[in-house]
Amino acid sequence: MSTAPAAGMTTSMADPPDLLPLFAWLSPSFPVGAYAYSHALEWAVEAGDVRDEASLAAQVSDLMRLGFGRSDGILLAHAWRAAVGGDWAALAEVNALAVCLAPSAELRLETCQQGRSFLDAVRAAWPSPALETAAGALSGEVAYPVAVGLAAGAHGIPLGPTLEGFLLALVQALVSSGIRLAPVGQTAGTRVVAGLAPTVRALAADIPALTLDDLGSATFRADLGSFRHETQYTRLFRS
């Protein structure tokens, strides 16, 4: 049977975007130190708020829909647009806002340490003129979502896949913390990640239309938990 294209059809097609760098950047093995942070999940386990699969799923879902997940996605989108447009002043403003929005010292360390490590690693292994130019605008603290948005925009990776990958990586990092804190096992944790995939997809679809005025969160107990974690007697994580 012939495999030649039918008359009137063409074999040429636009090259799809190269998403392989994104897969590498959001891998747990990428050197940003994500394993050291729990975003106050460690305190939630200590307090008894997270004790099984259902409560872990609820906690992570709230953090994504009502807390830092949604806000970080908005910040990433604006950083991506600034990178695509070469608007380094706008990028610096978004980054300053992102750093200021961290509700506690530990959560500021969480986003800034990962952001700086991410940007340095990408610049070393995936250099680009845009990244080098942007480095001058981000010479101090760099928020993690801003760094990811900048890198993706500078390398021509579309916003949609970047948001989906980034938000899913946040879910996986939180669930990984839950597994290491022992209220759930690996199979249960995998079910939590799979169950939250529609939440990630919905957030990634909504965020591109949102502005910086839409930033905000309502996860007050988790934010207060990040303060209490600072003096928690036994700690595995830095946040």
Image (spheres, rainbow, N blue to C red):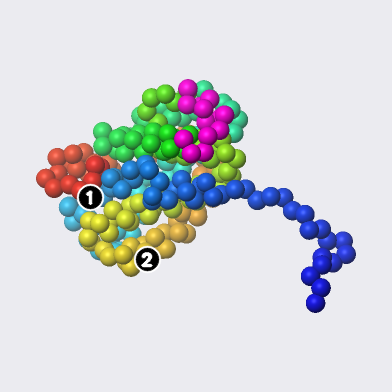
CA gap between label 2 and label 1 equals: 20 Å
Between 120 and 180, the one nearer to me in the picture = 120
Res 198 seen here: yes
The residue drawn where x is 52% and y is 46% is: 21
Query: Mark 2 or 1 closer to N-term?
Result: 1
Between 17 and 56, the one nearer to me in the picture = 17
The residue drawn where x is 33% and y is 52% is: 174
Relative vertical location of residue 3 with respect to residue 136 in this rendering, above or below: below
Q: Quadrant of the C terminus?
A: top left
Which disc is residue 42 wearing? 1
Q: Which amino acid type is shown beneath numbered disc 1?
A: Glu
Q: Is residue 220 magenta?
A: no
Residue found at the far front of this picture:
125
Which disc is residue 191 wearing? 2
Q: Which amino acid type is shown beneath numbered disc 2?
A: Arg
Which disc is residue 2 wearing? none
Res 204 seen here: no
> CB atoms at circles 2 and 1 under 8 Å apart?
no
The residue drawn where x is 34% and y is 45% is: 34
Image location (x, y in percent) of residue 95: 43, 29
The residue drawn where x is 51% and y is 27% is: 132
Q: Quadrant of residue 52?
A: bottom left
Relative vertical location of residue 3 with respect to residue 35 in this rendering, above or below: below
Left or right, residue 219 beside residue 127: left
Residue found at the far bottom of this picture:
1
What is the span of residues highlighted in magenta in the rendered image? 124-136
Image location (x, y in percent) of residue 234: 13, 48
Name the element at disc 1: helix
Between 160 and 55, the one nearer to me in the picture = 160
